[in-house]
Image (cartoon, grey):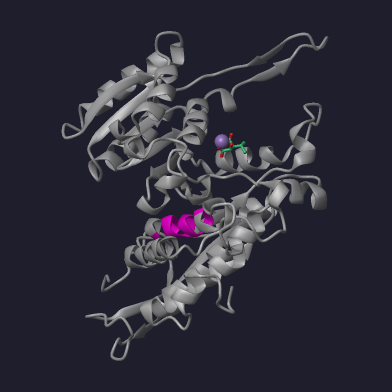
Amino acid sequence: MSSMVVVNFKPTILKQATTFDYKHKLETTLYTMKYTIAVIPGDGIGPEVTSQAKKALDAVAEVYDHIFLYKEAQMGACAIDSSGNPLPDATINICKSSDAILFGAIGELKYDNDPTLKVRPEQGLLRLRKELGLFCNVRPVKAYDKLIKNSPLKKEIVIGTDIAIYRELTGGIYFGTKETTKDGMSAFDGCSYTVQEISRVTHLAFKGAQNRKKKVTLVDKANVLETSRLWRKTVINIAKEYKDVALDFLFVDNAAMQIIQNPKQFDVVLTENLFGDIISDEASVICGSIGLLASSSIGEKNALFEPIHGSFPQAKGKDIANPLASILSAAMLLEHLELHDEADAIQRAVEKSLDLGITTQDLKGKNQYAASTAKVGDFIADYILNQEDSAMNFKNIHMGQSTII
Ligand code: IPM
Ligand code: MN
């Protein structure tokens, strides 16, 4: 455990507490820190899974003596329903004035199949990314031993997979000029990138690689696209500043194949917005469940944390969605605030829940007992608070006999 919390965001020091009888025996002084966290539960299963992440954060706050002040905000279909706007100004303001943002999911079925709608939930998220300048999206894909049996791939292919996808998030075809001709017979989406846009995400990818296996793979379509050729030139130049990191290249169609054939070859995958969207969904199934994958979207001043899975409207309100991706997003949020021990505590609790099989139905066989969303959240919080002394009887929980399940 760190002796003092180092923060890069302007938290308030509330009090200085000695650690004399503190459970985790800090060697020096602990400062109580206060952080404001914007919480955007969003649509579908977003609110259910985000509540579990908050339970985990509350447990961390208790054990490590921090204060997390949540400010709830609306975005997506729920915001359209209540105000006609998928991203109300109030949400932007809350996000801008917070130390970090925890986001659930966005999207609803009624919008998915109707291309004529002018106002869509996704516009909220896209505008928020642009508005806050969240240019770097990091999506880690790591194989958990316990879950390898859930992978659609062979065990020997999956074991040891550990990839970090760095996706550029505020440029490219997502944000280019869009047009449909008056007669409705032709449409246009422009894709452009500047050296500056490519450079800032590239630096973060190389720095990320320096703390990992020191390899960056640039995924592009430089045999066809002008923007991809600019990516190559720019990345090759920047690579010269990171002599300890190896750089290689793959065309996106080949990368799509290689990620399935041999995911272990990848360390950091760096790519533009649309390719990153597709490749990261593909990579997310390798490890057994998309329900476990967290992500961060980082800008100069703000950072947002969210599960990779979408809003899964079919499961809304049923208490069956896997909350682990949201809980692990909260761990990434803590890492970002440089609360490393606190983030580890969440990681350990998640690993414990997997070890004990206290998981939702997506990770279970057909006739196996599955825990509900809320109960997985209860277990994670309880484990953070009580560790092995947990008031719960793990063995019974595992067998589905405990009263808390
Ligand atoms: C994602 C999502 C978004 C995207 C949608 C909801 C706009 O698929 O975060 O990957 O395409 O970026
Ligand atoms: Mn996506």
From what the image shows, is residue 144 above or below residue 252? below
Q: Measured from the top left, where is residue 317 in percent x and y?
A: 72, 58
Q: Residue at x 76, y 40 (%)?
A: 109
Q: Is residue 333 magenta?
A: yes
Q: Measured from the top left, where is residue 372 in percent x and y?
A: 61, 64
Q: Residue at x 45, y 79 (%)?
A: 62
Q: Residue at x 52, y 32 (%)?
A: 277
Q: Nearer the viewer, residue 133 or 162?
A: 162
Q: Is residue 348 visible?
A: yes
Give the main secondary structure of the magenta stretch. Answer: helix
Q: Residue at x 44, y 18 (%)?
A: 253
Quadrant occupied by the C terminus: bottom right
In the image, taking residue 250 as reference, residue 47 lies left or right, namely right
From what the image shows, is residue 244 above or below residue 103? above
| Residue most extreme to the bottom | 21
From what the image shows, is residue 3 above or below residue 134? below
Q: Nearer the viewer, residue 386 or 72?
A: 386
Q: Measured from the top left, where is residue 45 in percent x and y?
A: 66, 53
Q: Is residue 205 magenta?
A: no
Tell me where the magenta segment starts and ends, as one range. 325-334
